[in-house]
Amino acid sequence: MAEWFVAFEDPEHPEYSAVVEDDGCVAYAYFLVDEKITGLVWLYNSANEQGRTWEESREQGLPPRMPDDNVKDPTFAPIASESELEATWVTYLDRREVGIYIRGKVHAAVGEGDYPGSCLNAIADSPMANAWVAED
């Protein structure tokens, strides 16, 4: 599925929400407070081709793709339907965060002020996602 977004509201704190968006080139999750983006995390590159460059992203005001050499699973299948996506809200160290689950497995986490959040599909920290190693 290309060019879509899904919004999640925090059931305990109505001022918090999250949006997961795939623009056909790349997918990100955004953490919002009172409908303003206050955190973000890259989830996956959705296009098989290189897609837009970092410079094109900046010029067009669009989110950049993760460089291929920093993607743990470059064959990660983009989300095909909204049913493959879940959000879990937690309070961690006195702040609210949302965990993003894809196909029933934790994939990323982002909270207020996270520029960026953490993603299991990132190999190393970057401006788009911090590398996250989940504990078994």
Image (tube, helix red, strand yellow):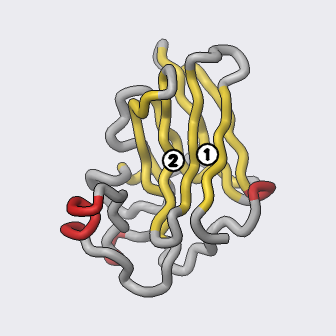
Residue sitting at x 36%, y 58%: 63
Q: Residues within 10 Å of mark 2 (few under 14, many from 20)?
A: many
- Say left or right for 121 vs 131: right
User: Which residue is more in the foreground, 115 or 72?
Assistant: 115
User: Which residue is more in the foreground, 12 or 129?
Assistant: 12
Q: Is disc 1 placed on a helix, strand or loop?
A: strand
Within the image, what quadrant is residue 56 found in? bottom left
Total numbered badges shown on the rendered structure: 2
Where is residue 10? Give x, y as percent.
Answer: 66, 24
Within the image, what quadrant is residue 37 found in? top left
Q: CA distance from mark 2 to mark 1?
A: 8 Å
Where is residue 78? Give x, y as percent.
Answer: 62, 70
User: Which residue is more in the foreground, 132 or 38?
Assistant: 38
Q: Looking at the rendered structure, which numbered label has been put on residue 68? A: none
**What amino acid is labelled 1 in the image?**
Ile
Within the image, what quadrant is residue 53 found in? bottom left
**What amino acid is labelled 2 in the image?**
Ala
Image height check: is 128 above or below 95? below
Is tag 2's residue or tag 1's residue first in the polypeptide sequence? 2
The residue wearing badge 2 is 29
Where is residue 65? Give x, y as percent.
Answer: 36, 67
Residue sitting at x 51%, y 64%: 23
Image height check: is 123 above or below 73? above
Is residue 125 visible in the rendered image? The answer is no
Disc 2 and disc 1 in contact, CB within 8 angstroms: yes
Disc number lying in front (2 or 1): 2
Where is residue 1? Give x, y as percent.
Answer: 67, 71
The residue wearing badge 1 is 100
Q: Is disc 2 placed on a helix, strand or loop?
A: strand
Q: Residues within 10 Å of mark 1 (few under 14, many from 20)?
A: many
Residue sitting at x 57%, y 49%: 20
